Every structure is written in structure tokens, then in C-alpha cells.
Image (tube, helix red, strand yellow):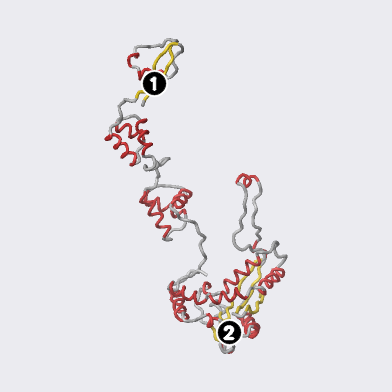
Amino acid sequence: MIKLFILNKSHSLPSPRKYFFALLPSLYHIDILPPIYYIHTISISNMMRLSNLVVDEIKRLLHQGKSSREIAKRVGVSIGSVLNVRKEVLETIPILKAGRPSKISERARRFLVREYDCGRITTSKQGQQLLKLVDGVDISRRAVGKILKKEGLKTYIQQKKPSLTDSQKSARLEFARSHLHWTTDDWKHVMFSDEAGFCRIEPFGKKYFRMRPESKRLKPNPSQKTKQSGGGKIFIWGCMTYNGLGDACRFPQGLDSNLYVEVLKDYIVASRDYRQLDPARFIFQHDNSSIHTASIVKNYLRKSKFAVLEWPANSPDLNPIETLWAYIRRELDKYDTDPKDLDDLWERFMVAWENVPLDFIHHLYEGMPGRMQKLYRSRGASISY
């Protein structure tokens, strides 16, 4: 169905004139139309239609993702005819990509995603270097991030884990084999101990704030207060048992083996007896720091006839007291104001230490068999805790 223009007297011809001449070839010789003519339209339904072969060819090219202009030029029909056919198959044809073509080949894109997914590269700079090597193109780090986001990769915070040598991994694996059969009842007889340092100004974890982007540019942004060396630091030795926490003591920064022996004399037996652990089945644990392995410390433990758990070197991920330290730091971070001095920090620590829930301690001990299984499955490598 098309529309044909017919001239009548009265008004001048509306623009554009080209449609009038295209539909009335007999009037091509007219240069200027008299002002007494105007246009009416009538419908004619017997115009020529596109053949089925041409329609099928247009549909095939549309499904290949060709543009309407390109199809019209190739088939030899008008763009309007192509658009009419396109309406019939609109839901089945692919959406045309907008914008300029990607500088990165599909092969390089797949390779980049695979390297990140396997953990062989982790930073945007490494991604830049990889694409430069594979495709010979220079792109920004932001572009690398967009590619990874489009491919479904998400950003995670890297966990801090000890760097282990092959010999340390072997020792850890042997430790796992020796304790795979231990149940929670076996671990109940172990007293875990460790040292930790706490800064007076030490926010735990990341701090966030919310603000409109325009406000962020114009107003002072919230920030974390910091001081050199954290405003001072205290060092603490503590121990824990299944029946509750033992003693905690504050000591000077320069802890040596002689002072450590005095700490053990004052607090091991006192904490064991206070928490009613069986002396016959009691096991003491500490790590392999140089202070703990000094001959004077070993001699004292041997004379005291304490059973000492042979602990693998460089293994904080196996010690549940590390999780206890993290809990204490979170409790200290709940205060609205910073400690006035180091004595105030020590008082806050003791409040948190004395109020650790017993269920939390039981949960740590009950997780020890699972830690041994994880360690065994990882063949001595670092585990999450």
C-alpha cells in the first residue's frame, strides 16, 4: 500500500517537491508549480512486492548482524524495505554492537581472564603487561578492570598468609598426620599461648564513609586519625584453655628468654590450676620463636615436667589464639574515643579479656580437628582460619 499525490487548484505545493516528481513522471518537465495547486493523497494496493527469495536473503543477512544500510546496498533494495523486513524478525536477530571495535582480540581476552582466574596474575599492571605481550596493544589499568568486570570476575581482599618453605610445609604436613585422630576432647587438655602487640591508636579493619560525589569534592572527607608508631604500644602475653582464658600479663618491649622464663613461672601453673586442668594430661603450647626455643626456656620446661606440644614453625594459621587476638582488637575498636595513654589501653584490654564468651572459646577448640583436616588436604600449605 503506497500513497499517490494528486494536484488540485487552490494552494501551493507543500515541500518536499521531490516526492511529487518521483510519483508523477509525466510532470518532470514542470519547473515551477503554479500557486493554485495543492496535494491530495489516494491509496493504491497493487504495487510490486519483494520476492520471497529477496526477503529470505535480507533475513539471512540480518541474522548475521549486518546493518540495514549494508544489506540494502548488497541486495539492491531500499533501506525502508530492509527495515520493513527487520520488523518481522526483530526479536530473533542479534543486537548490533555500538561503539568502536575492541582493541583486544578475543583470544587475548580469554587468555587474560584465565590467568586471573587461576591466580597466576593479580594486579592490573600485570594484566597490562600480559596484553602488551600477547596482542601488542597498550591499554589503561582501568580498561583491564572493565574487561574483568564484564567477564564476571570480582575483586577480593588478599588474605595475609605466612610464606612457607618446602621444609616447613613438610613439617606441617607431618604435624597434621600426627594429630588427625585427635578429637575435641584431646585438644581440651592443651593450653595455647602467644604474645601480641596493641597500639594505642589502631583501628581494626577498613573504615568506610558515605557521601554524595559532589559533596566529596567540596567538603572535607572523613579520615582515620593516625600517629607515629600508633601513639605508643603495649606488648602482652596471654594463654587460653578450653575452660576459659588464663592469665594475661603486660611486659616491656624488650622481651628476652630470661623474662619469658619468669612469665612461665608466674602464670602457667596458676592458670592451669585456676581453670582446673588435669596436670597428668596437661599440654603446653607455644610457637617456635627464638625466645621460646632458647636453651634456658627448654631447660625450665624440662625441669617442670610440662608436656610441650611440638609446634611446626611459621604456623600462626594453626593457633586458635590468633583468632582470640582478632576478637580482642574488634572489642577495643568499639570505643568511641582513643585511649588517653598506654595504661588506659591496658585497662580496656583487660575488660575485653575478662569478658570473652566461653562459647567463643569452645568454638575455637572444637574447630581444631577441622584445622588438622584442612592442613592435611593442603599438603602442609597455608590454610584459612
Q: Residue at x 46, y 11 (%)?
A: 10
Q: Nearer the viewer, residue 299 or 39?
A: 39
Image location (x, y in percent) of residue 378: 44, 71
Res. 254 visible in picture: no
Asked whether residue 41 is in view, the answer is yes
Query: Exactly how many numbered labels are in the figure?
Result: 2
Expressed as whole percent of the image width and height from the top left, the position of residue 4 reads 37, 20
Nearest to viewer (mark 2 / mark 1): 1
Give the number of the disc on residue 296. 2
Residue 12 figure quarter: top left
Classify residue 236 as left or right of residue 133: right
Identify the secondary structure beneath mark 2.
helix
Residue that badge 1 annotates: 42
Using residue 49 as the reference point, say whether residue 344 is left or right of it.
right
**Quadrant housing residue 202:** bottom right
Circle 2: residue type: Ile
The x, y position of residue 110, in whole percent, is: 38, 53
User: From this viewpoint, which residue is outermost toward the left?
Assistant: 53
Identify residue type, mark 1: Ile
Q: Nearer the viewer, residue 247 or 226?
A: 247
Would residue 338 be found to the left or right of residue 6 on screen? right
Q: Residue 271 location in percent, x, y?
A: 64, 82
Residue at the spot 34% in from the left edge and 25% down from the top edge: 45
User: In the shown orientation, is residue 284 left or right of residue 92?
Assistant: right
- Give the spatial CA distance, label 2 vs label 1: 113 Å
Q: For residue 199, what is the image quadrant?
A: bottom right
